[in-house]
Image (cartoon, coloured by chain):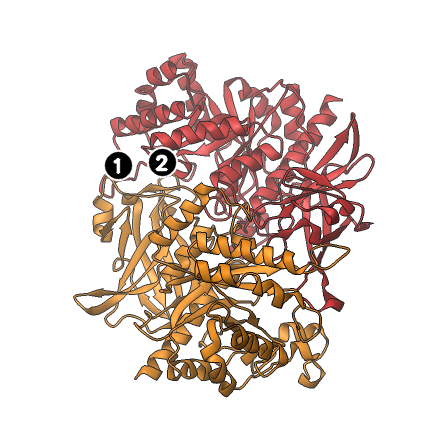
Chain colours: A orange, B red
């Protein structure tokens, strides 16, 4: 089941439209701005202003209930309706369409309301929103995914799980990453009907299940640490669940014992006791390299040594792009009463890991989480240097996943909008690199 | 299907709790403020501040997955979880509970996060919200209902239809009014499965279907007015649909031909051609008395004359309480650049219809829509004089529906909150009158 965005102009469905190989315009979706649905014959056009350019109200085409009509055809229609729970698609002719990136849209819907006094019965309903046009992903090279983490706070409130998958598909990504203990109802034992519905959703939205987020909560018990065997049980439980849901990797987040995020010492034994199962299921266990731990660090080295020692194919690194940040997230720093970078506590400082370090560990890397916090209206990321990261990955021949992990402010619908910006930015950089 | 409120503290579920006939405290619901679900043993208490009074974190009880536990029991628990899609109920001991009305709640959830450095691993997640405690409705007298119109903008976006019904039941109302062309998917021909699900929802939430909103769009065709027979067809279609969904009255909103909201002249013929069907189905057709049309007015008189002339039992008035407004809705007036009441155009002025007029037409009245715009934190309605209306209805022995129709600002969740305020206010007045 899906719901609509609360803003009248919907986030999904904004794209250029083609006719016979030519881009002839763009389209977007609107929910009905009235408090009731009604006959389409009561609609009297829609004026659209895109980036300041006005398109008169008789020009855009309306798609309602699968039929595409001009305003004149709407007026004559006898069996078309704009329901409250069905968005309209508005198509605006514009040769060449719109450029990738953020666009400002304003609309005025004209509607004849019979129960308003005649002089004001042709009423205007207005709405405005910024929308993000995402260029299609190119074949080959980086594979584009999104994590449900990006929609924290929105999922189960203003979006259903299906809405998240629909959003991911709509922006042209093909991979979906989930949080096991977040998105699996009745975790750790979802019912069979839910598992079936999950696979149906993957099929409907043509998405590949990528990485399954897992936690080994070493402080789960109040009075003692988790044992190695308990840690291994958790890993094996999540490996089986990940496999059942179609995932090919699983990231366990182990409890830590230091400011440097040294994982709890049980990690090694717990992983060792799970490797056979991981091999049997062909699911790769991926420890996460996450700020404040850089690549050149004993924690990362210990993982690489483990790979070398065991010779396993089912334990590889997951890189979180927060380690490449060139600027701290000042939202946090401001809370500390300083904007002097030297005064920011080490865990919040920008690590700025060099690209050479990334290149070095890419052979041991299975998955990249594209962590980010804010991308502005000009598609500038305020913290993460995509113009360095994307060409580095392309030149190194990276064909694995880059999975969006938005971690900025949690106003409703912001995650959805920011993920679209990130894909617009990264794909634009990837196209440049390909040329 | 239901979704959760985006705010961490949920609007539903706020109530006093009783034990052996004594009010022993209050409870409310929280969605998980973390980005993942987790074992309940990781929870380390919740501090609650209600109207400035602090309840320490070890005191409140937690209800998760149907089990009610102390913090100590949570810590020891091995098979209880706080899922992302399941709210927790927090119960706070407080002899006598809380008074009806608006209360300020702040919470701090303590959670052990294993993957945070140990010194900061016991982390705090905070949230605050104002909640409305609604006293139970008394037996006899006014019957309390709510219209889906109150949730305009929220329904199908941040609330499902089931959420609306759950909200209405949670605030202790027993009647649900809907908009036919708003809330019936695939109107005018919902599929049988939806009709079944509607009846199941009524049963689950113990709600009575009250009034079915309908429209006769006399300007439906661009080049001519609707004919009498077309109007009658619309009425008969909606009467049948209303009956199928369990409603006992139907309000047709006819197109108008004047600033005074004189209904289009087809109204009389269209209703006449539908009276036999209304009688057969036992559904009462209710024309709406709505500002700027008062009770003492030719429009209202024409309806009363129609009742007298036809002798029908299936055509009665619906009163919208906007006609009793003692203050205009300044949100609109300010748009006109004035706050001088004399300069406000007549359609926006407060009509202030006297209570005596209401008493006079009550015998011809079937339904009352409790229109309102804003009720403040002290339960003062800024526009509608409930302290006059409620005693008038009680003294006149009104045992019909009073159905909330919130029409104020449409920020998400505001309708839900305002309807709770209205019921708290009206029921408090009704209790006073009963004493």
Compute the Cα span from label 1 to label 2: 10 Å
Up the image or down, B168 lies above or below A246; here it is above
Up the image or down, A357 lies above or below A201; here it is below
Q: Which residue is mark 2?
A: B255
Q: Position of residue A174 (x, y in %)?
A: 37, 63
**Between A357 and B144, the one nearer to me in the picture:** A357
What SS does tag 1 mark?
loop
What SS does tag 2 mark?
loop
Name the image quarter holding residue A26.
bottom left
Which comes sooner in the sequence, label 1 or label 2?
1
Q: Residue at the top extreme?
A: B311
* Placement of the C terminus of chain A among the 4 image quadrants: bottom left
The chain that hosts pointer 2 is B
Residue drawn at x 44%, y 48% is A3
> What label does residue B225 carry, if any?
1
Q: Position of residue B5 (x, y in %)?
A: 57, 48
**Between B213 and A116, the one nearer to me in the picture:** B213
Q: Disc 1 vs disc 2: Cβ atoms closer than 8 Å?
A: yes
Q: Is residue A376 left or right of residue A266?
A: left
Q: Is residue A426 left or right of residue B78?
A: left
At label 2, counting other C-alpha atoms closer than 10 Å, the crowd grade (few under 14, some 14-19, many 20 or more) is many
The chain that hosts pointer 1 is B
């Amino acid at each position: 089941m899906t719901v609509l965005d609360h803003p009248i102009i919907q986030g999904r469905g904004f794209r250029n439209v083609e006719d016979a190989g030519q881009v002839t315009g763009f389209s977007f979706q609107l929910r009905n701005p009235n408090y009731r649905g009604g006959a389409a014959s009561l609609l009297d056009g829609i004026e659209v202003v895109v980036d300041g350019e006005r398109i008169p109200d008789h020009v855009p085409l309306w798609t309602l209930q699968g039929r595409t009509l001009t305003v004149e055809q709407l007026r004559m229609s006898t069996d078309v309706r704009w329901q409250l729970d069905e968005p309209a698609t508005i198509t605006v002719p514009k040769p060449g369409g719109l450029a990738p990136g953020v666009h400002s849209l304003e609309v005025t819907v004209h509607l004849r309301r019979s129960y308003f006094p005649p002089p004001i019965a042709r009423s205007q309903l207005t709405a405005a929103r910024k929308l993000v046009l995402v260029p299609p992903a190119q074949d080959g090279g980086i594979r584009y995914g999104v994590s449900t983490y990006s929609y924290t706070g929105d999922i189960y409130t203003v979006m259903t799980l299906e809405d998240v998958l629909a959003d991911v598909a709509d922006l042209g990504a093909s991979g979906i990453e989930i949080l096991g203990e977040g998105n699996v109802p009745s975790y750790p034992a979802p019912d069979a009907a839910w598992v079936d519905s999950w696979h149906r959703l993957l099929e409907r939205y043509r998405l590949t299940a990528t990485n399954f987020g897992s936690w080994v909560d070493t402080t789960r018990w109040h009075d003692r640490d988790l044992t190695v065997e308990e840690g291994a049980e958790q890993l094996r439980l999540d490996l089986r669940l990940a496999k059942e849901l179609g995932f090919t990797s699983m990231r366990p987040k182990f409890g830590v014992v230091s400011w440097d995020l040294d994982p709890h010492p049980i990690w090694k034994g717990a992983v060792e006791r799970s490797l056979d199962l991981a091999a049997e299921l062909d699911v790769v266990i991926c420890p996460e390299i996450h700020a404040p731990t850089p690549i050149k660090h004993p924690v990362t080295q210990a993982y690489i040594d483990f790979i070398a020692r065991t010779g396993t194919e089912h334990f590889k690194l997951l890189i979180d792009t927060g380690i490449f940040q060139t600027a701290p997230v000042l939202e946090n720093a401001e809370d500390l009463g300083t904007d002097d970078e030297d005064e920011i506590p080490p865990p919040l400082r920008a690590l700025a890991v060099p690209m050479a370090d990334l290149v070095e560990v890419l052979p041991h890397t299975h998955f990249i989480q594209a962590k980010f916090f804010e991308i502005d209206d000009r598609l500038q990321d305020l913290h993460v240097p995509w113009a360095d990261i994307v060409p580095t990955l392309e030149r190194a021949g990276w064909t694995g996943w880059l999975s969006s992990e938005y971690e900025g402010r949690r106003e409703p619908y912001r995650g959805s909008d920011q993920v679209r910006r990130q894909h617009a930015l990264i794909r634009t950089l990837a196209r440049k690199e390909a040329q």
